[in-house]
Image: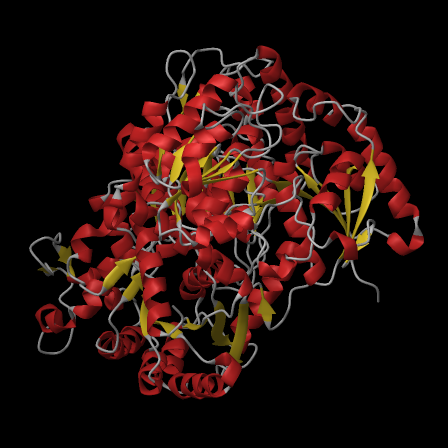
Amino acid sequence: MGKPHAVVVPLPAQGHVLPLMELSNRLVERGFRVTLLCTEFDHARMMAAAPHKESQSQQDLEGLCFVTVPDGLGSDDDRSDGAKLTEFIIGDFKRLIEDRLRKIHDRGEDKISCVIADLCAFAAVSVAKEMGVPGVGFSSSSLGSIAQSAHIPKLLESGIIDSNGEPRFENQTIQLSPTVPEMSTSHFWWSCFNEAMSRNVAFRVALEATKTVTLVDEILCNSFAGIEAPALDLIPKAIPIGPLLSPNRTVSKPAGHFWAEDSSCLKWLDQQQERSVIYVAFGSFTILNQTQFQELAAGLERSGWPFLWVVRPNLMSSSTAVYPEDFLNRLGNRGKIVSWAPQQKVLSHPAIACFLSHCGWNSTMEGLCNGVPFLCWPYFADQILNQNYICKVWKIGFELKPNEDGIVKREEIQRKIEDLLCDEGIKIRAMKIKDMAEESVETRMGKKPHAVVVPLPAQGHVLPIMELSHRLVERGFRVTLLCTEFDHARMISAAQRNESQSQSQQGIEGISFATFPDGLELEDDRGDALKLSEFFTGSYPRLIEDLLSKIQEREEDKICCVIADLCSPAALSVAKEMGVPRVGFWSASLGTLAQVLHISEAPRVRNHRRQRLQDQIIQLSPTMPGMSASYLWWNCFSDPMIRNGSFKLIPGTTQTVTLIDEILCNSFAGIEATALDLIPKAIPIGPLLSSNRTVSKIGGHFWADDSSCLAWLDQQQERSVIYVAFGSFAILNQAQFEELGAGLEQTGRPFLWVVRPNLMSGSAVVYPEDFLHRLGTRGKIVSWAPQQKVLSHPAVACFMSHCGWNSTMEGLSNGVPFLCWPYFADQILNQNYICEVWKVGVELKPDEDGTVKREEIRAKTQDLLSDQGVKARAMRIKEMAEETAGVFGNSVRNFDEIVEKIKRLGGIS
């Protein structure tokens, strides 16, 4: 079988060619043949600039070949003219690319496996789609710039910009999303040109990128989550694969440079003191006039620091650069001037103190990855946004400000150099970003630390720990998840049906599975809490111990860390015996965990016959609200055998806490601060919700999602739909089921109702007579729903829920009020939180026979949806959840800190 064939299409500009050339080299290393489409002029320049020219074929080089197109310009035309370049991109470039792609694909031996095209090369992905070839977008700029382009339709619709891309109001401040910093409309990358014609031309390119985004499923980006997480959240299709820097292995490969590098500067750097040299380079497009050129030279001289200055052949607006009188004489060995430098090697040199840069994205990434502070001198386009990142977001550089005539004066240069090089905070922050970049590279390229994750075999426990596993994978881990054979089969089956594609039975996207039997027959009821409790306290510990020992014995699978549900004491106990770092995980609320850890209070809530004192009010600490003894989660079962079985789990959990230093919790301080104070080892990392990035990943669900409900929701009015779902364990009898159906009907509101296959205590669901016929399109019934997508849909008005902790967190995170209908265990406490502490819902109360009547459902629905206070409080909690889960949020910081600790303890970093 031949190698897969990728066609790569950059935009004909060096800043776009460089990262795509590096991507092409990496594809070759991973077994691809790559054809790179470029202009004849650019190809000739790359070949002339490439090292070891004499040994290279002009058309084929180490798995990478070139197909060229003319650019319609003469050899002496200015290819840095943005207007001419754009006219070519949106004109002849389309036709030429389409012609070349079809010719390549028509050759039998060159069938194209995929097309990877610059977002501004709309024609390439359009033709690929027509040919039935997978198309992937690529962005050579920041995620922030992509977000701006992708939001053009909304910016036009809201009247923020006009049809030419011009801001309607000068210096208007906008925010693309709650997680992204505010920005001025003057910072849109297409607005950052002095001439209106250039701005209009740039906007036309941005529109091309917008069209490309709609055609592709993935956008590869030369960035990484550590520096642009908020922008990443705005672009569901974005896949950060940066930093795309060429390591030493590509010395003999074309890197995409248009000028030959002068490596003599490296020897000069070897002679300089550590952190002493100012590196000055303005990329491939920046133009300076003579006045500015001389001010820059004078400013560098006055700084008193040695400097390395790249003076590109076409840097000047005039024909040649004229230095200040006697400047080169005075310079001596204190400065080095070259026409082009091997920039990555320069920036990684220990002599470099700072980078005076135009803030092009490639240069920005190279500076970040080497921990070098910046002096920012942007020229146009996205460089203004990049300066904003550097100076205001990451705070690792200073802006060089021009005077009223647009000239950056020598005094400004001298002063800012002095300020920058004595700012220790900037240096520290720059080194932290370097560490993040190295971690991002190690995640892709190096040996990954191996974490074993052990959930309890119940969906409510598996869901959050599966999301935790995905987040570990995203941070460079390999994960082995230990689960029962039955649960594993159900997760894989649900994932396959969700994606309509084959999933690996033993591994997917960094997560592998190690399975064990649960001792039950296929037809046994795994919703039987008593059987589950017997399994947990019976054969479960021995099976876990055996699996962990076998994994650890394999040299290639050495365990870096065990993360286990607190109800799995065997896993943490074995990890301790093996000398492996271990971390606990708690899938329920912090309040529930506080109950477990304060079990010594249990005698106060039982009489001498061990019977519960139902109405006794207890208080775990002065900062916790009082609660009834009936809210202790192990008391929230009607069957005394199940209560006793649940209670037996508690001593093991309490003992487990003594084996660990940290307990990761799917909660956040904003909603459970008082409970958090009671648990010194607790580290809140919630809400653990899967985002769009995990669409193709196993989510831990035991049933396949019926996504048809999303299209139905699209047809409903905003805040009109009652969403009804009772999790994976709740059981209804026929009388209660019919009352619920009648109650929903009587509300007069549209509703989406999840009727799980095993929701009924009987064998089959029986709806009220003629119910489905009367329902029509006012209601939608599904067997399982993509709940996070449902709750985030604008049509959803409220959530009738069993108040399981995962559902509670999902509702809170989307600002949805609750109709509370708890079933058992911690769900009673969660209802207490919702209705009495947070006050974002109302309780559905059963009558004396234990049935929630239709009249109660109708009345409480009306009460809830007319209560503006509940809605306002729900939105405030949503904002808290977004803040804590944001890039600088407490939960993200907590998780990142524990990840770093695990790596240190495991000898990884």
The answer to whether 339 is drawn above or below residue 406 in the figure is: below
Residue 865 picture quarter: top left
Would residue 499 be found to the left or right of residue 524 on screen?
A: right
Quarter of the picture containing the N terminus is bottom right
The answer to whether 696 is drawn above or below residue 537 in the figure is: above
Q: Residue furthest left?
A: 622
Where residue 619 sits: x, y (%)? Answer: 10, 58
Q: Is residue 218 visible?
A: no
Which residue is at a point 64% across and 51% down the rendered structure image? Answer: 22
Quarter of the picture containing the C terminus is bottom left
Compare residues 92 and 375 and report the one nearer the observer.
375
Q: Is residue 265 visible?
A: yes
Compare residues 607 and 394 and report the one nearer the observer.
394
Where residue 167 sits: x, y (%)? Answer: 49, 14
Which residue is at a point 88% across and 41% down the rendered structure image? Answer: 102
Where residue 147 sits: x, y (%)? Answer: 52, 33
Disc count in the image? Answer: 0
Which residue is at a point 76% across and 59% down the rendered structure image? Answer: 62
Would residue 147 be found to the left or right of residue 407 on screen?
A: right
Which residue is at a point 49% across and 25% down the rendered structure image? Answer: 323
Residue 561 picture quarter: bottom left
Residue 200 picture quarter: top right
Where residue 41 sits: x, y (%)? Answer: 77, 34
